[in-house]
Image: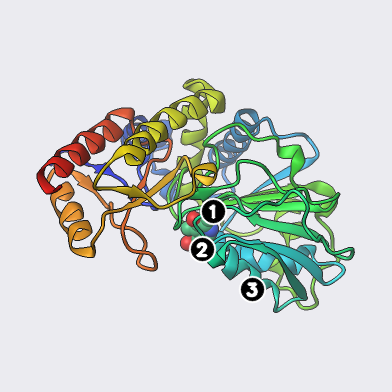
């Protein structure tokens, strides 16, 4: 069986070079006589893996020294709780709801304080990013929360909201490391690894160090305090050790391949191919407003559910898999993260053109 072009939203494709290198080290990591999976997380060898992963991530994202990098577990979803438990000092925060993940975070925050809905695109099935240039930011808000790339709907913030001086918290799960970002504009960034970075089981948190404190929501478990993990340099307990090792390899792969500037060029090229075609197709329609389109998750439909289904089924026979849209929205979604090669997008495009000719 050859490798397929996997358009899944996550877990998703990883660079084949990374997988091959990990395979070659599987039984005997650098003459230790064991796999990284079998290694003590307190060993010198593992400490080096963790240090190198962090240092390479710092390099690739240009993370300022006053930010901590934490490798945690619990996925993106656990951050929906950790963020308010740790950052809602005034018991109030503002949320911009642009999709399912943002709404989940918003609802979670309500358990820990007053969560205000300051903007939403629910009125049009989350098919756009609302204007966030002059929001009614609450005086007491401890932070403003966004989901920067909406994996399910295929939208992205092309411009960050004006938070009027408040801290910006961003869920970057599905756009992390897809292009350069200015980390200093954020108080906290988090990303589940399984979309664009590595295997499931790791979530990366980048947090400005003055936001880490003992002062948290009462009875916040030790494991859910950023301070616990920051003090212990992500080794408070056994971390998701193998997952971090793979993430480290992806960071190195990014550095060796032109960094995030090069990723941006490549990702824009891939997305443009699909959107240009979708804008002119007689069969397929893009579902997202032009100014809000994601570079990572391209969503589209035909005129009927039957035709959508036929497309997904026939694409699969061509080795173009997981093109089904999220169960909440239907239609199609092509997730084209960093590791999706240009050839994969070209193969999808050629198939779409053929399908259009046969079905119009
Ligand atoms: C997938 C996803 C999540 C949830 O991640 P889990 O690791 O499954 O908890 C949260 N936010 C965004 C933007 C996602 O794409």
Q: Looking at this view, is 40 or 197 the one in front?
A: 197
Q: Secondary structure at mark 2?
A: helix
Q: Residue at x 45, y 32 (%)?
A: 267
Mark 3 crowd level (few <14, some 14–19, many ≥20, 10 Å Cα): many
Q: Can residue 193 be seen by looking at this rendering?
A: no
Q: Which residue is mark 3?
A: 108
Q: Which residue is mark 1?
A: 128
Label 2 or label 3, whichever lies nearer to me, is 2
Question: What is the C-alpha distance between the residues marked 2 and 3?
Answer: 23 Å
- Is there a contact, CB below 8 Å, between mark 2 and mark 3? no
Q: Can residue 69 be seen by looking at this rendering?
A: yes
Q: Residue at x 51, y 20 (%)?
A: 258
Q: Which residue is mark 2?
A: 124
Left/right placement of residue 95 relative to residue 354 reads right
Mark 2 crowd level (few <14, some 14–19, many ≥20, 10 Å Cα): few
Mark 1 crowd level (few <14, some 14–19, many ≥20, 10 Å Cα): many
Q: Secondary structure at mark 1?
A: loop
Question: What is the C-alpha distance between the residues marked 3 and 1?
Answer: 23 Å
| Quarter of the figure with residue 327 | bottom left
Q: Quadrant of the N terminus?
A: top left
Q: Looking at this view, is 194 or 118 the one in front?
A: 118
- Is there a contact, CB below 8 Å, between mark 1 and mark 2? yes
Q: Looking at this view, is 41 or 126 the one in front?
A: 126
Label 3 or label 1, whichever lies nearer to me, is 1
Residue 140 higher or lower than 14, as above or below: below
Q: Residue at x 17, y 49 (%)?
A: 316
Left/right placement of residue 96 relative to residue 348 reads right
| Quarter of the figure with residue 260 | top right
Question: Residue 79's spot in the image, x, y percent?
Answer: 62, 62
Q: Secondary structure at mark 3?
A: helix
């Amino acid at each position: 069986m050859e490798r397929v072009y996997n358009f899944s939203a996550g877990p998703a494709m990883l660079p084949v070079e990374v997988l091959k290198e990990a395979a070659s080290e599987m039984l005997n990591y650098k003459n230790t006589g064991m796999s990284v999976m079998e290694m003590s997380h307190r060993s010198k060898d593992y400490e080096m893996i963790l240090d190198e992963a962090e240092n390479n991530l710092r390099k690739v994202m240009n993370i300022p020294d006053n930010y901590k990098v934490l490798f945690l577990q619990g996925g993106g979803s656990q951050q929906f709780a950790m963020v308010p438990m740790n950052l809602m000092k005034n018991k109030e925060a503002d949320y911009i709801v642009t999709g399912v993940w943002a709404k989940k975070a918003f609802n979670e925050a309500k358990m820990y304080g007053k969560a205000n809905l300051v903007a939403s695109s629910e009125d049009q099935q989350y098919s756009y990013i609302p204007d966030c240039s002059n929001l009614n930011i609450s005086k007491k808000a401890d932070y403003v929360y966004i989901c920067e790339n909406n994996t399910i709907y295929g939208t992205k913030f092309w411009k960050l909201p004006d938070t009027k001086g408040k801290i910006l918290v961003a869920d970057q799960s599905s756009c992390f490391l897809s292009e350069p970002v200015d980390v200093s504009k954020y108080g906290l960034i988090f990303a589940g690894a399984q979309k664009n970075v590595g295997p499931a089981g790791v979530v990366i948190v980048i947090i400005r160090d003055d936001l880490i404190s003992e002062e948290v929501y009462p009875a916040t478990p030790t494991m859910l305090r950023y301070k616990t993990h920051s003090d212990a340099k992500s080794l408070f307990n056994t971390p998701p050790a193998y997952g971090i090792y793979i993430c480290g390899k992806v960071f190195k792969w990014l550095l060796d391949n032109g960094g995030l500037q090069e990723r941006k060029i490549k990702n824009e090229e891939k997305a443009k191919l699909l959107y240009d075609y979708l804008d002119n197709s007689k069969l397929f329609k893009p579902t997202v407003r032009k100014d809000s389109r994601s570079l990572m998750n391209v969503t589209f439909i035909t005129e009927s559910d039957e035709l959508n289904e036929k497309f997904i089924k026939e694409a699969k026979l061509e080795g173009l898999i997981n093109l089904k849209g999220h169960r909440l929205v239907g239609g199609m979604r092509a997730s084209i993260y960093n590791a999706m090669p240009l050839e994969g997008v070209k193969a999808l495009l050629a198939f779409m053109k053929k399908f259009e000719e046969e079905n119009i």
